[in-house]
Image: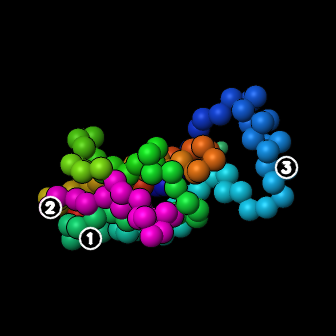
Amino acid sequence: MKVIQHTGLGVAQKLFVFAVAAFMAGSAFAHVFPKTEEPAASAVVTSPAQVRIAFTGPLEPAFSSLTVTNAEGTQMTAVKAKVDPANTSVMSVGLPVLPAGHYIVHWVAVAPDGHRTQGQYPFDVK
Ligand SMILES: [Cu+2]
């Protein structure tokens, strides 16, 4: 099951952002969400070399993250996630060889305007 949460700003900040957004009658990417996921949510795959998510808008690399845990909650990712400098909507993280089992991808996506969304989804290694 996919879980997506929006966390973060207080009411005053939201009103401020809303006011700014109202002034900018354009395309402000307030919240970004996964558009494509590799491996896909609930997929059963051989050990993937990486997890890669393309989001609906650009990410702020300093605050966005992508990690993978196993069924016991142990962190499997040993390296930091990278936002693709050529396409800042794409974030990926390399994986070690994963034994057969159930895994959870945890993502945090912070848009350049500071809006933060987060979620998780599972996949299985056969
Ligand atoms: Cu927001």
- Name the residue beneath numbered marker 3: 22
Q: Earlier in the sequence, mark 1 or mark 3?
A: 3
Cβ of mark 1 under 8 Å from ligand 1: the answer is no
What's the magenta region?
A: 81-97
Mark linked to residue 45:
1
Mark linked to residue 21:
none
Q: Is residue 70 left or right of residue 39?
A: left
From the viewer's perspective, is residue 10 above or below residue 69?
Answer: above
- Name the residue beneath numbered marker 2: 97
Give x and y (percent) for residue 88: 49, 63
The Cα atoms of the two marked residues, 1 and 2, are separated by 12 Å
Q: What amino acid type is highlighted by mark number 2? A: Val
**Front label number (1 vs 3):** 3
Q: Residues within 10 Å of mark 1 (few under 14, many from 20)?
A: few
* Residue positioned 48% across, 69% down in the render: 87
In terms of image quadrants, where is residue 57?
A: bottom right
**Mark 3 vs 2: CB contact within 8 A:** no
Give x and y (percent) for residue 118: 51, 46
Q: What amino acid type is highlighted by mark number 1? A: Val
Give x and y (percent) for residue 114: 60, 43
